[in-house]
Amino acid sequence: MKRRWCFISYILTLIILFIAKAADNMLTTGKTILVQRNRPVLASLSVIASQIIFYKLINCIGTADNDLALYIVSVASGVGTFLALKVNTRFSKERTFVNVIFSDDKQAMMELRDFLKEHHITNLASDGYTKDWQKTIAVTAYTETKEQSRLIDEYLAHHQIKYKRIIQRDK
């Protein structure tokens, strides 16, 4: 029974090491992003937390009786960096892109407007006209994240309707 508890304790220790190192790398990568965005206080707090985790990890790895902990922490480093970049891509709001989208198909434009609303993408629908002076809808979408831009890209790509899209970078 004691041997079983030792094994479970060992596995839990490795899991904790993995989570701690992934968090450490997320903080380190986050610090770099925060420095680029001129957020010195948050970057400093990230460094402090990262250093505490790092030195605790060094202590645990140094006292480990084999190399498995070292390999676990190494893999967790890559996972932490990957996760930090994914989170940054998903929630980055460093610039706004203005997408002006037109189509001759008024119904398709109404569906696009509903799609944007469902995905909480700020937009403005206004009257527009086709080349033949038929009334349609023009949609202006204000994307704040790369994820929102990706959603619009995918939406337009997966529909057979012909859209005209003009993208401008807002200040």
Image (cartoon, helix red, strand yellow):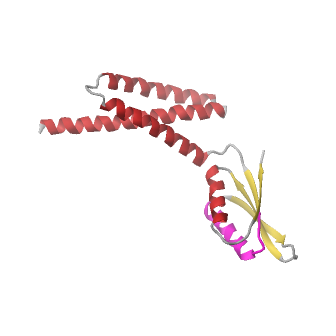
Residue 152's spot in the image, x, y percent? 66, 60
Quarter assignment of residue 128: bottom right
Q: Which of the two residues, 166 or 170, is positioned nearer the viewer here?
A: 166
**Which residue is located at x 83 percent, y 76 percent?**
135
**Which residue is located at x 32 percent, y 31 percent?**
69
Quarter assignment of residue 68: top left
**Which residue is located at x 60 percent, y 35 percent?**
33
Placement of the N terminus among the 4 image quadrants: top left
Q: Which of the two residues, 74 or 122, is positioned nearer the viewer here?
A: 74
Residue 8's spot in the image, x, y percent? 22, 39
**Which residue is located at x 48 percent, y 28 percent?**
50
Main secondary structure type of the part rendered in magenta: helix
Would residue 87 be counted in the magenta stretch? Answer: no
Picture layout, residue 80 above or below residue 143 = above
Placement of the C terminus among the 4 image quadrants: top right
Picture layout, residue 155 above or below residue 11 = below
Residue 38's spot in the image, x, y percent? 67, 31
- The residue furthest left is 1
Picture layout, residue 103 above or below residue 74 = below
Numbered circles on residues, count: 0
Q: Does residue 148 appear to the left or right of 29 in the view shown?
A: right
Q: Which residues are magenta?
A: 101-119
Q: Does residue 98 appear to the left or right of 158 in the view shown?
A: right
Q: Does residue 156 appear to the left or right of 135 in the view shown?
A: left
Q: Which of the two residues, 147 or 75, is positioned nearer the viewer here?
A: 75
